[in-house]
Amino acid sequence: MALDDLRKRIDELDDRILELLDLRARVVADVGRAKKDADLPTYDPDRERLILDRLASRAGRFPPEAIRAVYREVMSACLALQEPLRIAYLGPEGTFSHAAARALFGLAATYTDATTFEGVFDAVARKEAVYGVVPLENSSEGSVDNAVDALIAGDLLIRAEMELEVAQCLLSRAPGLASIERVYSHPQALGQCRVWIAKNLATAQLVQTSSTTAAVREALSDSRGAAVAGRLASELYGIPIVRERINDHAENITRFVMVSLEDAARSGNDKTSVAFSVPDGRGQLLRVLTIFDEEGINLTRIESRPSREKKWDYIFLADLEGHRQDPNVARAMERLRERCPFVKHLGSYPRARKA
């Protein structure tokens, strides 16, 4: 077939795709009215996840991840026709939290940035936003302490998680590395690039900022400054990328969570997060952990955090396989409440696909 004929065929297919997208939007509008009549929420993340999984599983020549990306935007646009979905994230615009929120909800959602993790949680608690997106841990730097503390202190639950590859870049208007005297960024980002900075910018002053985007703003006004941030920040603020992928570990993954007033329904491939304290005394932690083993539950993560109630008092956070509605998880939670002075359910949610 001649090139002109092939191009004409593509135009015909694009026209058909547009017709079907318009038809889909009309059906989605009918779904929205039906949900309103039944007093159901407009956005159903569990249904959305099932749709994306089903479509990706049917991939042919079109790559599965590209199918997810395309339909993420299709569903985001259709949802915006029903009711704008407001999402809170740790700002300003251009942070990795912003990138994670856009990956979860698409470009058609309405985004509101908060200056603190507590601000994200407060926006959702006050129903100024339907969901919040915050980073919880990084594969090389560990937990994001302020986010963990806000989760324990608040009343929101984890409804979903996602893993995002965090490729840190050095952004600057300086003519070269030798001209850079100051490096700005969030402590987590600086920590992820500690070795690279020591080797390549050994004499530069490290300046901590509240976010990677705040670092970019500092670097914009500092002719001898640079920021450690992501590609999205470079695109949004027009500051050149001097070096890409400067993080010390090639596989640099951050786990983000979506928080809401409710956690997720059981999917069959779930995780549950819980916080608990243990009584004082020898062997108490071992006795508590034995509960999970006796119930056949695998712990995927456990860490301790200062309780902030009294000195040298700690709270343990654990992620475990299973949903709170699973019989063995429900029994384990009940046994924890019988033994532990403090137990808090932090959410049950589908396990994330690997980044």
Image: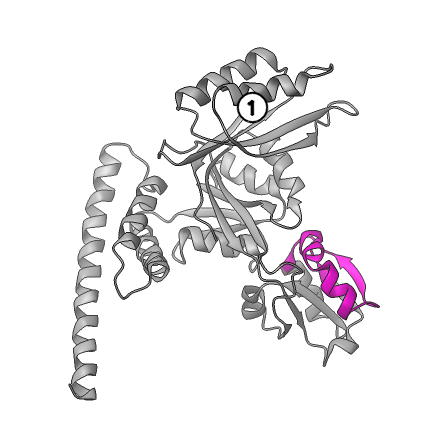
Q: Is residue 51 above or below residue 99?
A: above
Q: Is residue 349 above or below residue 182?
A: above
Q: Is residue 335 above or below residue 246?
A: above
Q: Give the residue displayed 20% in from the left and 76% down from the top.
A: 10
Q: Give the residue displayed 71% in from the left and 54% down from the top.
A: 191
Q: Is residue 3 magenta?
A: no
Which kind of residue does numbered mark 1 sit on?
Lys
Mark 1, secondary structure of its residue: strand
- The N terminus lies in quadrant: bottom left
Left or right placement of residue 243 versus residue 133 in this view: right
> Mark 1 = which residue?
344
Percent from the top left, x then y, of residue 18?
A: 21, 66
Left or right placement of residue 188 versus residue 301 in this view: right
Q: Is residue 206 magenta?
A: yes
Percent from the top left, x then y, of residue 227?
A: 69, 65
Q: Is residue 128 visible to the viewer in this orientation of the structure?
A: yes
Mark 1 crowdedness (10 Å alpha carbons): few <14, some 14-19, many ≥20: some
Percent from the top left, x then y, of residue 150?
A: 61, 35
Q: Is residue 148 above or below residue 83?
A: above
- Looking at the rendering, the stretch of residues picked out in magenta corresponds to 184-212
